[in-house]
Image (cartoon, grey):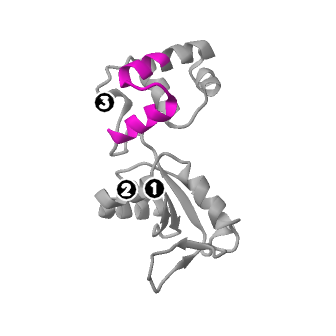
Amino acid sequence: MRNDLHRTEGAARETRLPEGLATFAAFETALSMIPQPTFVIGRGGEILHANRSGEQLLVRERLNIERSLIQAARGEAQELAWRLTSLGDALRPPGFIAVLDPVSPRAGGPQPGACGWKLTARQAEVLELVARGETNAAIATTLGIKERTVEFHLSALFDKAGVDNRATLIARLLAL
């Protein structure tokens, strides 16, 4: 099996996954499970790979995304908020996994209070934490409330968004 980071049919150039990362299939599967636009970028911010959400975002906003990722890799302020995780020695030269934060005030995407669902302040807090991938228990701890109260707020969020589960709620939020 070849460890191609990105392969285009008939393309003469292929980018290979560095030796330090496990198998490409496992790595790509892990990236595909992240609902937010996610990129593997080099130390300078150049895009080496994108998950499906990232590819869709590139179709619409390539120049803005490329510029923002370069700024993020340099540690500069950028329009979009990226959560960077260093790949350390896995890439030569080292690089990052960059995940777009869908609910950050700097993100150009949806804001919990601006989604038109008429959320209470607490519902907006719960939605932000759900969008970040937190569990009900973690949300309860963060907000200093009982887990049952988190479930109550989630139920209200599902009703307001017209969905019946977390995954669809996040998908709806990302589609805004």
Q: Residues within 10 Å of mark 2 (few under 14, many from 20)?
A: few
Residue 120 quadrant? top left
Q: Looking at the image, is mark 2 or mark 3 earlier in the sequence?
A: 2
Q: Quadrant of the C terminus?
A: top left
Q: Residue at x 60, y 20 (%)?
A: 140
Residue 55, x across and y down, in percent: 41, 59
Say what secondary structure mark 2 lies in.
helix
Q: Nearer the viewer, residue 85 or 165?
A: 165
Q: Amino acid at mark 3?
A: Ala
Which residue carries the number 1 mark?
52
The percent coordinates of residue 100 (x first, y second) are 45, 49
Residue linked to disc 2: 56
The reply to whether discs 1 and 2 touch (Cβ–Cβ < 8 Å) is yes
Secondary structure that dominates the magenta span:
helix
> Is 159 contained in the magenta span?
yes
User: Pointer 2 and pointer 3: residues touching (CB < 8 Å)?
Assistant: no
**In the image: residue 29, left or right of residue 54:** right
Query: Could you tell me how far apart the alpha carbons at marks 1 and 2 are, in whole angstroms?
Result: 6 Å
Label annotation for residue 114: 3
Tell me where residue 93 appears, x and y as whole percent: 60, 74
Q: Which residues are magenta?
A: 155-176
- The one of 139 and 51 positioned closer to us in this rendering: 51
Mark 1 vs mark 3, CA separation in Å: 25 Å
